[in-house]
Image (spheres, grey):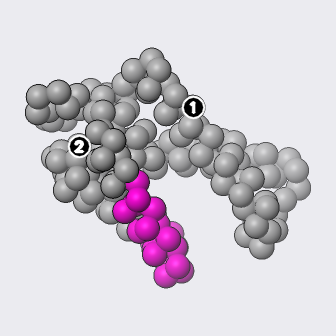
């Protein structure tokens, strides 16, 4: 998600930034999900963490960071709602079965991130940019974009 959100804005992260962003974000995801937040509050916490990491690690303005977070989560949601849920429904898997079965959870999880994986390839190979970050007021430092 770290690569896709910023990549769709035309911002290429350095390897160290990407690794730190991904690890801290992953740890936050584990923590927030373990809190068993009601009504999907963990998603809002993860968006806020993603944006905060963008400001601190990537050193982009907050509006650019929230835009990157929104794009990344939109792509993840697209994978969940356009692919994972319909396939699970076609195969007759209930949400309870998916939650209780580690194997089904992994299968559905991989289907959910499949769009992110395709976008990683498109950003890396074809320099796919959805919105240039300069439109949001981002002025990259030398060699950052």
Separation of residues labelled 1 and 2 (CA atoms) = 22 Å
Residue at (39% x, 21% y) in the render: 127
Is-magenta flag for residue 28? yes
Q: Position of residue 141 (x, y in %)?
A: 11, 33
| Residue on which the image places disc 2 | 64
Which segment is the magenta one?
Answer: 22-44
Label of residue 53 in the image: none
Q: Please say whether residue 71 is visible from this viewpoint.
A: no
Element marked by disc 2:
helix
**Contact, CB < 8 Å: mark 1 with mark 2?**
no
The count of marks equals 2
Ranked by sequence position, the earlier of labels 1 and 2 is 2
Look at the magenta stretch and give its main secondary structure: helix
143 with respect to 26 (left or right):
left
**Number of residues whose C-alpha sits closer than 10 Å to that of mark 2, classed few (under 14), some (14–19) or many (20 or more):** many
Q: Is residue 9 above or below residue 85?
A: above
Q: Residue furthest bottom?
A: 35
Residue at (20% x, 31% y) in the render: 144
The quarter holding residue 82 reads top right
Looking at the rendering, in which quadrant would you find the C terminus? Answer: top left
Q: Position of residue 116 (x, y in %)?
A: 54, 40
The quarter holding residue 22 reads bottom left
Q: Position of residue 99 (x, y in %)?
A: 73, 70
Element marked by disc 1:
helix
88 with respect to 19 (left or right):
right
Label of residue 118 in the image: 1
Residue at (28% x, 33% y) in the render: 11
Is-magenta flag for residue 91? no
Q: Is residue 69 above or below residue 137?
A: below
Pick whichever, 43 or 109, lies toward us.
109
6 with respect to 137 (left or right):
right
Q: Is residue 6 above or below residue 57?
A: above
């Amino acid at each position: 998600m770290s690569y896709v959100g910023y990549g769709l804005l035309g911002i290429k992260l350095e390897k160290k930034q990407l690794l730190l962003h991904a690890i801290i974000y992953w740890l936050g995801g584990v923590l927030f999900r373990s809190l068993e937040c009601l009504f999907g509050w963990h998603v809002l916490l993860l968006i806020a963490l993603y944006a905060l990491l963008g400001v601190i690690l990537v050193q982009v303005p907050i509006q650019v960071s929230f835009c990157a977070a929104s794009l990344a989560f939109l792509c993840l949601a697209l994978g969940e709602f356009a692919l994972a849920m319909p396939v699970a429904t076609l195969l007759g898997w209930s949400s309870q079965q998916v939650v209780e079965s580690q194997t089904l959870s992994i299968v559905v999880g991989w289907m959910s991130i499949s769009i992110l994986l395709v976008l990683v390839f498109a950003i890396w190979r074809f320099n796919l940019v959805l919105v240039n970050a300069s439109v949001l007021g981002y002025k990259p430092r030398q060699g950052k974009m």
